[in-house]
Image (cartoon, rainbow, N blue to C red):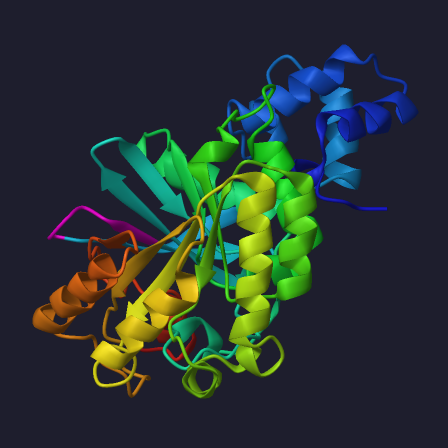
Amino acid sequence: MNYDIKSMTASEIEAVLKQLGQPSYRAKQIYSWLHKNKASSYSEMTNIPKTLIGKLEEEYPLNGCEIKRRQISEKDSTVKYLFELSDGEFVESVVMKYKYGYTVCVSTQAGCKMGCAFCASTVGGFRRNLLPGEIVSEIYTAENDLGITVSHIVLMGMGEPLDNYENVMRFLEIITSEEGHNISMRNISLSTCGIVPRIYDLMQKHLGLTLSISLHAPFDEMRSRIMPVNNKYHIDELLTACRRYAAETSRRISFEYAMLSGINDTDECALALAKALKGMLCHVNLIPVNEVRESPYHPSTPERVKRFVELLEKNGITVTVRRKLGSDIDASCGQLRLRHTEGKD
């Protein structure tokens, strides 16, 4: 059976090599080549016998990703990648530079099922889940291209991470492995639109990552209009899960809130949001959205964002405003893929 070896844990690679009659130390060598040295082909593994490489190439091909297009912001050096996967599907990643280092925002699915009205990822439709090895390949390919090492990871690109739960959990195990890339779980944020049962599953794992909830509205009717997932998991049910998650893990939840002009940026919305989150271990991250041509929504004015912040803070809610990055390079999730598939790039 062919299987992506980059999606395997070190112990699984050891089991494969044992079947091939190889010593256990070969597994550590190969795992190190894949996840420390970020090898994109077996030919780079100079201390692995050629006969073994031939066998692995035949039975366990390396499914990575290739750079199809790269955009670099002239404003803030944000880099947006369009990656082509081995089967011809496309996903996007973004590398952002901050004072503390580099953060990479990765995709977990090719396309998205969730149908959020303001997001470009859903316009092209859902194609498939990404394998763990494909998600790590987004990171390694970007690092190799830029000559950097990222310190933080955000699962907030194309797709809904908790809709690809098993593969994402395996990705987290691999990327935080001490034998591999060894990124701290506390430097990883996972963003979900609110698949409630999976939030409870995640809670039981006590992973130490930051859970981000894409909330975007304080009222069910409003949220259901822009986020169809709310028709299945209403705000009260979602916030109950969030309160339990925060209490169980002692990890502060981040609520993402895209500021949409004339939709969810009113004083009434700010006061309702503050009331809904009162007493929870959390903070609100307001997002000045980038324009998406296919969306009827527009970003709130700076004055409206400032007023929203004032109302939240006055009512005891910790709030930040996300730095707006990459507005000149189609940095919103799904835009670059959409341009490419439509033949407009």
* Residue 287 seen by the camera: yes
Is residue 132 found left or right of 146 in the rendered image? right
> Looking at the picture, does residue 15 appear above or below residue 345?
above
Q: Quadrant of residue 295?
A: bottom left
In the image, 20 versus 114, the foreground residue is 114
Is residue 247 found left or right of 297 in the rendered image? right
> Looking at the picture, does residue 299 appear above or below residue 80?
below
Q: Quadrant of residue 42?
A: top right
In the image, 311 versus 78, the foreground residue is 311
**At which x and y percent is residue 149?**
37, 29
Determine if the magenta segment contains residue 79.
yes
Is residue 4 found left or right of 136 in the rendered image? right
**At which x and y percent is residue 109?**
56, 61
What is the span of residues highlighted in magenta in the rendered image? 74-80
Could you tell me how many numbered marks the image carries?
0
Is residue 29 found left or right of 345 in the rendered image? right
The residue located at (16%, 62%) in the rendering is: 310
The residue located at (64%, 12%) in the rendering is: 47
The residue located at (66%, 58%) in the rendering is: 198
* Residue 64 seen by the camera: no
Q: Give the dominant element type of the magenta stretch: helix, strand or loop.
A: loop
Quarter of the image where the C terminus is located: bottom left
**At which x and y percent is residue 235?**
52, 73
In the image, 121 versus 165, the foreground residue is 165
